[in-house]
Amino acid sequence: MRRLDPVVLISVVICTVDREEMARKTVDSVLGQSLESETGLEIVVVDNSGEGSAHPWISAHPAFGEKLRYVHERAAGISHARNAGIAAARGAYVAFIDDDEMAKPDWLKNLYRAMIEHDADVATGPVFPVFEDRETLGWDPEPFIFSTHKAMQTGHRVQFARGGNVMFRPDRCFDVAPPFDPELGLSGGEDTQLIYRLHLQGRKIIWVADAVVHEFWPNAKAMLPAFLHRKLISARNSTYVHIVNDRNPLIATVRIGAKALVQLAIFAPLAALSAPFGRQPSARFRMHVMSALGKITYWKRARYYGGAGEAGA
């Protein structure tokens, strides 16, 4: 087992837009991390609102100026906010968590330990949903949305990671400026693009099974249409990333488009016919339809970030 560094600072970046109540909980969950005594912590909150609406409550926080820092990034878009956080971070390790998530007390320690023990460049862990006023939705969205990789053991290598639960070694990962593509700032996919590029460069990206965060889903966000929209956006983003990073983008476009058309031909009729047989099969087939549509329309960069409350959507 590799020993932990004797003295190390970990920076945690939280990007936020007009989401004070939830962002406060995110900050407090990070401040409550059970870190080793040799490990230091700083939290960089990047306010991506035009008017700097998060400054009053952050500057009034008891941890402000000690472990909590404030950065105002006026350029709208999650890429700009993430890049501003990286520029401000002083740690040898930089982690990201979204402003609608809460970390388990051992989240950061487990990410860091796994990176040291496996000599990794990037580490990521599971994101579990917490719904506003219900235990379940009457159907299980996890197979379609939440990338939990339950069967994976810590140290398993992966190609992608979610920007809401990830830790980087900046000296190994941020060799391109800016690291997160500004062109994807409003549509999303900037985290997929960066991490997949690192994978293609041979960087070691690992899964950490016990580095858990919980994502809050209000009722409006937990409706099936919202899940379907999210699936469409994520399919567009992942397809875009695969195509632009392929050695022959034209052939990749044709190949992915052909598979999507077959997928659409199979699952569109099943989605139409499955409604009487329960929400789970119906949701499953509709998710496949949205995935196919996202692949076919990957070039369409819809606005998904940049409005109020969307920095950590």
Image: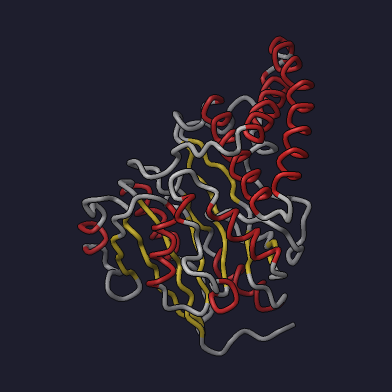
Residue shown at 76%/44% (left/top)?
Answer: 251
Measured along the vertical axis of the image, is residue 243 above or below residue 168? above
- Could you tell whether 188 is left or right of 146 in the image? left
Q: Nearer the viewer, residue 206 or 30?
A: 206
Horizontally, is 219 left or right of 198 in the view? left
Give the residue displayed 31% in from the left and 49% down from the top.
20
Residue 283 or residue 78, whichever sits in front: 78
Q: How far from the left and from the top, in percent, is residue 283?
A: 66, 24
Q: Position of residue 138 (x, y in %)?
A: 62, 24
Residue 305 position within the rendered picture, expressed as x and y whole percent measured from the top left: 42, 43
Quarter holding residue 159 = bottom right
Q: In this rendering, is residue 32 above or below 145?
A: below
Image position of 90 with respect to 194: above or below: below
- The image quadrant of residue 193 is bottom right
Residue 51 in the image: x percent, y percent?
21, 51
Q: Is residue 169 found left or right of 30 in the rendered image?
A: right
